[in-house]
Image (cartoon, rainbow, N blue to C red):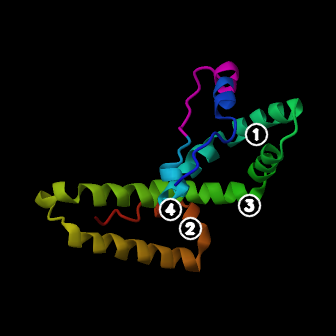
Amino acid sequence: MTCNYKKGHGDEYQDYKEEFHPGKRWLPVIRALGGNRQDGSFEGALPIYDQRQDILNFLVKELDISQSILQDSLFMSLGSMQVIAMLRVASILHLAVMMPTRWLAGNTHKLADCKWGEKSMGRVIDLLHDAMLKVQSDGSILLHYDFIMNIFSPL
């Protein structure tokens, strides 16, 4: 049994965005399967990283109105360099690794003409393993666009 009750101030944040940033592009913040899917954490990082400053501005406005331990904690977390770095890396991994891998896995049955099948997914894992070994020896290359966005280019 799950307890799906209202948490946070999603409606108020939506109103804030419409009032102070009309017409601005917003990536939807998702919470897949109640947060039970590991890839959901990576998928949710990109919108939060993208909207971080707007969320902080909203929280400042809300905290001026009333004190909230949860909002105060969120404000401090989203302002910390460690969380910003984690959101950035998770966003990069979502775009460069998770999305292509998810697409290949979900479309394997359509790629027979390209000589691609279920067993071909092993090549994806091999390429990812090799890339992560390079990241292990030099973590800074994770932030290099040409490296991270071309992990699967041999395919």
Callout 2 amino acid: Ile
Q: Quadrant of residue 11?
A: top right
Q: Which residue is mark 4?
A: 38
Q: Earlier in the sequence, mark 2 or mark 3?
A: 3
Classify mark 1: residues with Cα within 10 Å, few (<14), some (14-19) or many (20+). Answer: some
- Mark 4 and mark 3 in contact? Answer it, CB < 8 Å: no
Frontmost of labels 1 and 2 is 1
Frontmost of labels 4 and 3 is 4
Vertical order, 155 against 58 (above or below): below
Vertical order, 100 against 142 (above or below): above
Using the image as rendered, state which of residue 17 and residue 31 is in the foreground.
Answer: 31
Q: Which residue is mark 1?
A: 56
Residue 17 lies in the magenta-colored region = yes
Q: CA distance from mark 1 to mark 4?
A: 25 Å
Vertical order, 87 against 63 (above or below): below
Q: Which residue is mark 3?
A: 82
